[in-house]
Image (cartoon, rainbow, N blue to C red):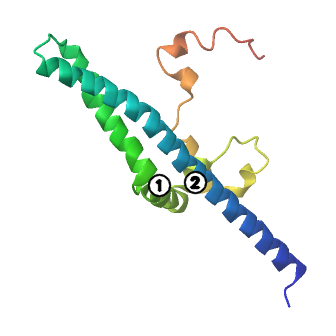
Amino acid sequence: KKSIRAGVEEEVSRRMMMQREIQMAVNISRARDTLHVFGSLWLTFTSGVTIAQLAKKPVPKVAFAPVIIGGIMLGNIADMAYGNKLARVNKEAAYILEHERYRFVPFPQAPFARFYSDEERAMFYDEATAVGDLAPFSLISRSFGPKKD
C-alpha cells in the first residue's frame, strides 16, 4: 500500500510529465506551422528568381541572399518540425543540467538561492560583469538612475 506522500509525488510527477509532453508537442507544432508559412513564401520567391533567370531577365545579385539564407533557415526549422532536433536539444539540456548547473544560479535575493552551493555561486558570479559596467554603456547607463547614498 502506497503512502499518501508517495501517491502525491506520483501524481505530481505524472502531471509534470504531461505538461512536458504538451510543451514539446506545442514546440513541434509551432515549428511545423512556421515551416509551412515561411516555406511557402520562400518557395514562391525562389521560383520567381529561378523563372526570371531562365527567362534571361535581369535579377539583382542581392536577390540570391534570401534564397540561400532562407534555405538554411528552413532546413533548421524543418529539422525541428520533422527531424530529431528536439531530441538533440533535450540531450544538450540534460548535459547542462548535470554538468553546468551553476548557469542557473539566481540573484542572491531569490528565495531559492540558498539551494545552490557556494561553489556554484562562485562559478557563476566571479567571472561575470554586470552589463551596465561594460563599454560603451558603462559611460551612460549608471548616470541616469538615482544615486544611493
Amino acid type of the residue tagged 2 in the rendering: Met
**Residue at the image point whose x is 47% and y is 54% from the top:** 86
> Would you say 24 lies left or right of 112 here?
left
Number of callouts in the render? 2
**Residue 83: x percent and y percent?**
39, 55
**Residue at the image point whose x is 34% and y is 29% from the top:** 42
**Residue at the image point whose x is 57% and y is 41% from the top:** 125
Q: CA distance from mark 2 to mark 1?
A: 8 Å
Q: Which of the two residues, 57 or 128, is positioned nearer the viewer here?
A: 57
Amino acid type of the residue tagged 1 in the rendering: Leu
**Residue 58: x percent and y percent?**
14, 10
- The relative height of residue 15 versus residue 72 in the rendered view (above or below) is below
**Residue 88: x percent and y percent?**
42, 57
> Would you say 8 lies left or right of 80 here?
right
> Would you say 107 lies left or right of 5 here?
left
Q: Looking at the rendering, in which quadrant would you find the N terminus?
A: bottom right
> Would you say 60 lies left or right of 123 here?
left
**Residue at the image point whose x is 78% and y is 66% from the top:** 12
Q: Quadrant of residue 130?
A: top right
- The relative height of residue 119 versus residue 77 in the rendered view (above or below) is below
Asked if the residues shown at circle 2 and circle 1 are in contact, with their CB atoms under 8 angstroms apart, the answer is: yes
**Residue 97: x percent and y percent?**
55, 58
Mark 2 sits on what residue? 24
Q: Which of the two residues, 113 or 58, is positioned nearer the viewer here?
A: 58
Q: Quadrant of residue 117?
A: bottom right
Q: Which callout, 2 or 1, points at the residue further toward the start of the chain? A: 2
Mark 1 sits on what residue? 86
Task: Answer whether residue 123 is visible to the viewer in this image.
Answer: no
**For the residue labelled by badge 1, is the local secondary structure a helix, a strand or a loop?**
helix
**For the residue labelled by badge 2, is the local secondary structure a helix, a strand or a loop?**
helix
